[in-house]
Image (tube, coloured by chain):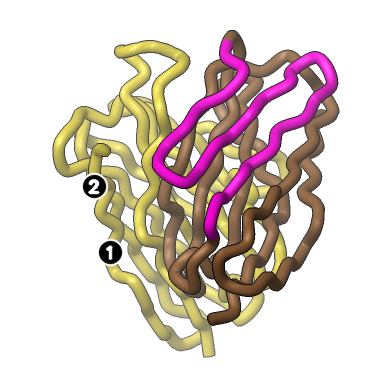
Chain colours: A yellow, B brown
Amino acid sequence: GAVVSQHPSRVICKSGTSVKIECRSLDFQATTMFWYRQFPKQSLMLMATSNEGSKATYEQGVEKDKFLINHASLTLSTLTVTSAHPEDSSFYICSARDLLIGWDTEAFFGQGTRLTVV
Amino acid sequence: KQEVTQIPAALSVPEGENLVLNCSFTDSAIYNLQWFRQDPGKGLTSLLLIQSSQREQTSGRLNASLDKSSGRSTLYIAASQPGDSATYLCAVRPGNQFYFGTGTSLTVIP
């Protein structure tokens, strides 16, 4: 299957700093990327959907000024957690699909990023 | 809003047993359903994708079925192995995004 690479896999940062997470599609063009977060013992919740070259669409309750998403190319999307606080500590996972192929295509996920804010 | 439920939440079986994981969803208007595996602290590995028009998909020891009208899917694992120990997630896609279940944590005891 297609490969989605997410970096870093783990990051620890101080409260108040910003952290950038990268999501790359290595062997296909990701017209659309999705960002999820997962709290312990809970399922994945969609945070936002980003389409290449346009602004991201955020789910209700997700602060767009806090979670900045940039999808500047067909192979790269970034999520920046600004002014991170301990409650932002979570597991963040990106997913990518090439929607130009069709709606019924398989989704591929990155390896996830464990963010710990201290 | 689509809700996805997985039962059981946790399952422990001896090596070699066949087992079934269950997934139910509230809205049958979906494009497809996908089963994933997640190892602790890791991302998701896609196992099987079932389109809304399909009834089942098979890959090796895995078989997934879909009954869209009743809002149910099952993942059958034959001859379980310790390496199958992980959390299994099902996800349905009614539109652009996925709705995930909370997963079944599987432990296969050697």
Residue that numbered label 1 is attached to: A7
| Percent coordinates x, y for residue A37 in the rendering | 57, 57
> Which chain does tag 2 point to?
A
Instruction: Give the SS element for disc 1.
Output: strand
Q: Residue A114: x and y, percent?
A: 45, 73
Magenta-colored span: B54-79
The quarter of the rendered structure image containing the N terminus of chain A is top left
Q: Residue beneath label 2, please?
A: A24
Residue at 62% across, 62% down: B17
Q: Residues within 10 Å of mark 2 (few under 14, many from 20)?
A: many
Disc tally is 2
Does the segment drawn in magenta span residue B2? no
Q: Quadrant of residue B91?
A: top right
Q: Residue at x 75, y 44 (%)?
A: B22
Q: Secondary structure at mark 2?
A: strand
Front-most of B6 and A55?
A: B6
- The residue under the point 43% across, 78% down is A17
